[in-house]
């Protein structure tokens, strides 16, 4: 199914610009979660967790992108229909945001450790099976979880511009906007690293971000150490072939047609591999659906919630 983004574009811009002013102001004026805590992930790594929305609602767990943080979901979790109706749980992946940042590559190269991270966060949902929303490399992490634990403890999932492969398997799916800057964002030379991080941030969206939001995105990326950057993308994995065919819960794969980081074929092939999946192509947006097309993201979450009542 292909959707035009025109119907939601003005709303998306309004939400994004509203957040611009909070980014431009002091940190105290950023949207705040209703609660925060730390949980122990795989291998004892400490993960920063944030809770938003309606504590009495069904749980939704959000997994963010490479060199991002839970802040990448602010248009969805800080207000609106999803926040009004659901118990929302975000967290910072290991090596990202406020979570612990191990200094060895091995801490980021194990699919089991990453699966254990997500499993620890899913436990916060209690007795209810959560919906999972996974963006970019968050798709790999969700797939790692599904490979290790199966789908018995989740209700369904929404993937946003997600990757499902790493290493040699990912070459067909990595777009030029990431490929051209990948060596630089792994560089120990600070000037090279900063320039490449700025470059890949430019490529993230189809339309330029407002300056304050752009600055916040680069700053968030620069928090992530080299070990996490290199470790998370260096192992070989092909969840399209090895994992998704075994997942039976409802899945939605959303992908922007102008994504210059992960090719839309990643979601198309993943949706074709999973037995209970639907592909939604969003015209004209890039790699950040929560900011570029929040209406479509909200609609997909609501649809999964409806079919998994």
Image (tube, rainbow, N blue to C red):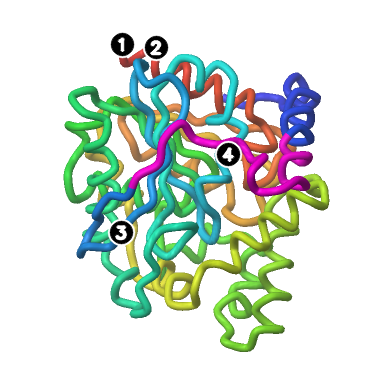
Q: Earlier in the sequence, mark 2 or mark 4?
A: 4
Q: Earlier in the sequence, mark 1 or mark 3?
A: 3
Look at discs 1 and 4 and give the one toward the viewer: 1
x and y percent of residue 166 in the render? 41, 64
* Classed neighbour count for the residue bearing mark 1: other residues with Cα under 10 Å, few (<14), some (14–19), many (≥20): few
Give the magenta range: 19-37
Residue named by callout 3: 46
Look at discs 4 and 3 and give the one toward the viewer: 3
Residue named by callout 4: 255
Q: Which sits in the foreground, 27 or 267?
A: 27
For the residues labelled 4 and 3, the Cα–Cα distance comes to 31 Å
Magenta stretch: includes residue 26: yes
Q: Say if mark 2 contacts mark 1, CB within 8 Å.
A: yes
Q: Secondary structure at mark 4?
A: strand
Q: Is residue 304 visible?
A: no
Residue named by callout 2: 306
């Amino acid at each position: 199914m292909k959707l035009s983004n025109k119907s939601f574009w003005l709303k998306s811009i309004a939400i994004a610009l509203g957040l611009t002013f909070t980014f431009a102001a002091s940190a105290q004026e950023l949207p705040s979660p209703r609660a925060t805590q730390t949980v122990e992930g795989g291998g004892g790594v400490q993960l920063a967790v944030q809770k938003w929305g309606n504590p009495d609602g069904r749980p939704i767990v959000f997994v963010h992108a490479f060199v991002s943080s839970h802040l990448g979901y602010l248009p969805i979790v800080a207000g609106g229909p999803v926040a009004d109706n659901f118990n929302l749980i975000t967290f910072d992946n290991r090596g990202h945001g406020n979570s612990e940042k191990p200094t060895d590559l091995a801490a980021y190269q194990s699919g089991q450790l990453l699966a254990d991270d997500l499993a620890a966060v899913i436990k916060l949902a209690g007795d209810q099976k959560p919906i999972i929303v996974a963006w970019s490399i968050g798709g790999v992490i969700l797939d790692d979880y599904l490979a290790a634990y199966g789908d018995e403890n989740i209700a369904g999932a929404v993937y946003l511009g997600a990757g499902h492969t790493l290493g040699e398997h990912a070459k067909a799916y990595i777009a030029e906007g990431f490929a051209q800057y990948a060596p630089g964002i792994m560089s120990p030379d600070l000037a090279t690293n900063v320039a490449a991080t700025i470059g890949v941030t430019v490529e993230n969206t189809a339309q330029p971000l407002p300056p304050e939001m752009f600055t916040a995105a680069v700053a968030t990326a620069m928090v992530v150490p080299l070990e996490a950057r290199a470790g998370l993308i260096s192992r070989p994995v092909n969840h399209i072939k090895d994992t998704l065919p075994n997942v039976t819960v409802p899945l939605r794969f959303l992908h922007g047609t102008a994504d210059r980081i992960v090719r839309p074929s990643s979601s198309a092939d993943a949706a074709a591999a999973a037995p209970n999946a639907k592909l939604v192509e969003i015209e004209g947006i890039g790699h950040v659906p929560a900011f570029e097309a929040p209406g479509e993201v909200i609609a997909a979450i609501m649809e999964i919630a409806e079919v998994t009542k």
